[in-house]
Image: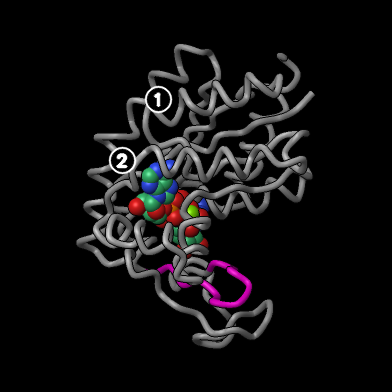
Amino acid sequence: MSTVVVLLGPPGSGKGTQAKRLVDVLGTPHVSSGDLFRHHLSRETELGLMAKSYMEQGGLVPDDVTVKMVIERISRPDCEEGVVLDGFPRTLTQAEALDGALEKRGQEVTVVPLIEVNDDEVLRRLTARRTCEDCGAVYNLLFSPPQEKGVCDVCGGSLYQREDDNPETVRHRLYTYYKETSPLIGYYFAKGVLVEVDGEQSVDEVHKELRETIKAAREQV
Ligand code: AP5
Ligand code: MG
């Protein structure tokens, strides 16, 4: 039985942080559409350069290219046992495309934890986020700072601030979330797979709640 987890929630709700922890437990890959776009951008591929303007403004990259990129990734053999999806789907069109692609492989979405965090907390967290340019480890200057300023605890790499983590762009990303992505709450609720999780707890507490949520969902299948 495969386990497909779709982490839903506003920017800064902790999707990436929690996905990294969950894959250690579940043993499935972590697929983040944002990370895939940033990877393309760092290599200056055609796709990365096309996505750049949308990302910088806090809007969504068009559905057709996003769906193609993510479906190609999750169709690889390493996702046969499941996957933790982070930041995808983000529109109803993407959600339907995901369902279609999974169905072809005899899979389905197992559970959709909705990680809830209020807008002020999102702003606070994202303007304080720092990421390692080498290993991708994520820090927060307020909640989980590195031991040495600007240096990754894990690999010694330099920490950078994401270009879209300035207050103006974060506000626009929140607007995009409410407008384009929040309809997915109803979509997955209707399918009986949505579970609300309080994202304002500590990272450990959210992780614990997510593990319990996923365990319960797997037992129901
Ligand atoms: P993406 O990279 O997915 O950005 P996002 O959804 O805005 O989410 P974030 O990565 O900002 O937040 P997160 O929820 O992962 O939080 P994190 O764990 O880092 O997308 C970027 C862009 O790419 C989009 O704007 C769009 O343009 C494009 N894109 C991506 N996917 C797309 C799609 N499907 N369709 C179209 N376009 C797409 O945590 C945030 C901070 O908080 C960190 O510093 C962390 O340390 C801290 N933190 C986490 N949890 C806690 C906690 N419990 N308590 C305190 N601090 C915490
Ligand atoms: Mg993320």
Alpha carbon of mark 2 to alpha carbon of mark 1: how far? Answer: 11 Å
What is the secondary structure assignment of the residue under circle 2?
helix
What is the secondary structure assignment of the residue under circle 1?
helix
59 and 141: which one is in front?
Answer: 59
Whether residues under marks 2 and 1 lie with C-beta atoms below 8 angstroms apart, the answer is no
Mark 2 neighbour density, 10 Å: few (under 14) some (14–19) many (20 or more)? many
Q: Position of residue 89 (x, y in %)?
A: 46, 35
Rendered residue at 50%/87% (across/down): 149
What residue did someone put label 2 on?
Answer: 177
Q: Is residue 35 above or below residue 73?
A: below
**Which numbered disc, 2 or 1, marks the residue that appears first in the sequence?**
2
Q: Is residue 146 left or right of residue 92?
A: right
Q: Quadrant of residue 77?
A: top right
Q: Position of residue 186 (x, y in %)?
A: 38, 19
Q: Quadrant of residue 83?
A: top right
Mark 1 neighbour density, 10 Å: few (under 14) some (14–19) many (20 or more)? some
Q: Amino acid at mark 2?
A: Tyr
Q: Does the rendering let one see residue 97?
A: yes
What residue did someone put label 1 on?
Answer: 185
Q: Is residue 200 left or right of residue 16?
A: left
Rendered residue at 28%/60% (across/down): 53
Q: Is mark 2 within 8 Å of ligand 1?
A: yes
93 and 2: which one is in front?
Answer: 93
Q: Position of residue 120 (x, y in %)?
A: 28, 52
- In the image, the segment drawn in magenta is 128-138
On the rendered image, what quadrant is the C terminus found in?
Answer: top right
State the count of labels: 2
